[in-house]
Image: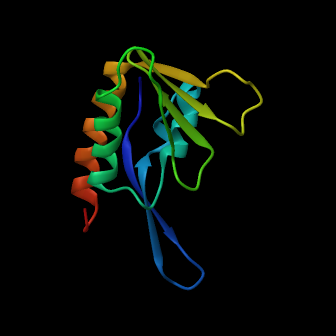
Amino acid sequence: MKYKFKKNEYLLESGEIFYEIGVDRESLDKNIFSLSYINWHGWTVGEAQMIIDESLKLTDKEIYDYVVPGTELTISVDKDYVYFFDWRTPQEEEDFSWTFNEFIDFMEAFKVFISKNTSTN
């Protein structure tokens, strides 16, 4: 699982600078490239913590689905695995999956990165 968090900066035509928090697309292996669609300007520590909390409280066969706002990336969580679906890709099955613990570790690290790279949480 190779990725690197990044605060992506974009210069708008108006001269304003626009930021997205997410991952560095160039750091991603081809098999997890759809993770790049986690990039979003609205990430807060609270949003990341909500995903962690909703995931941790799952029981039995429950599933928690999270769609990254403004994207086609759906993260589908159950107690064993987490499936990433980019609805732009042609296949119907997931683009990739992680174990539940891999996902929670990712989200905890992502939450720390968000905290260090946003002014309002």
Which residue is outermost to the right? 90
| x and y percentages locating residue 12 in the rendered image | 56, 76
Q: Closer to the camera, 95 or 57?
A: 57
Q: Closer to the camera, 80 or 1?
A: 80
Looking at the image, which residue is at 27% across and 48% down?
A: 113
| x and y percentages locating residue 3 in the rendered image | 41, 33
Q: Residue 99 is drawn in which quadrant? A: top left
Colouring chosen for the image of the structure: rainbow
| x and y percentages locating residue 107 in the rendered image | 32, 36
Q: Residue 50 is drawn in which quadrant? A: top left
| x and y percentages locating residue 13 in the rendered image | 60, 81
Looking at the image, which residue is at 77% across and 30% down?
A: 90
Looking at the image, which residue is at 72% across and 39% down?
A: 88
Q: How many labels does the image show?
A: 0
Compared to residue 53, the image places residue 62 above or below, namely above
Q: Closer to the camera, 13 or 48?
A: 48
Q: In which quarter of the image is the N terminus?
A: top left
Q: In which quarter of the image is the C terminus?
A: bottom left
Looking at the image, which residue is at 51% across and 84% down?
A: 15
Compared to residue 88, the image places residue 41 above or below, namely below
Compared to residue 95, the image places residue 50 above or below, namely below
Determine whether, in the image, residue 87 is placed left or right of residue 32.
Answer: right
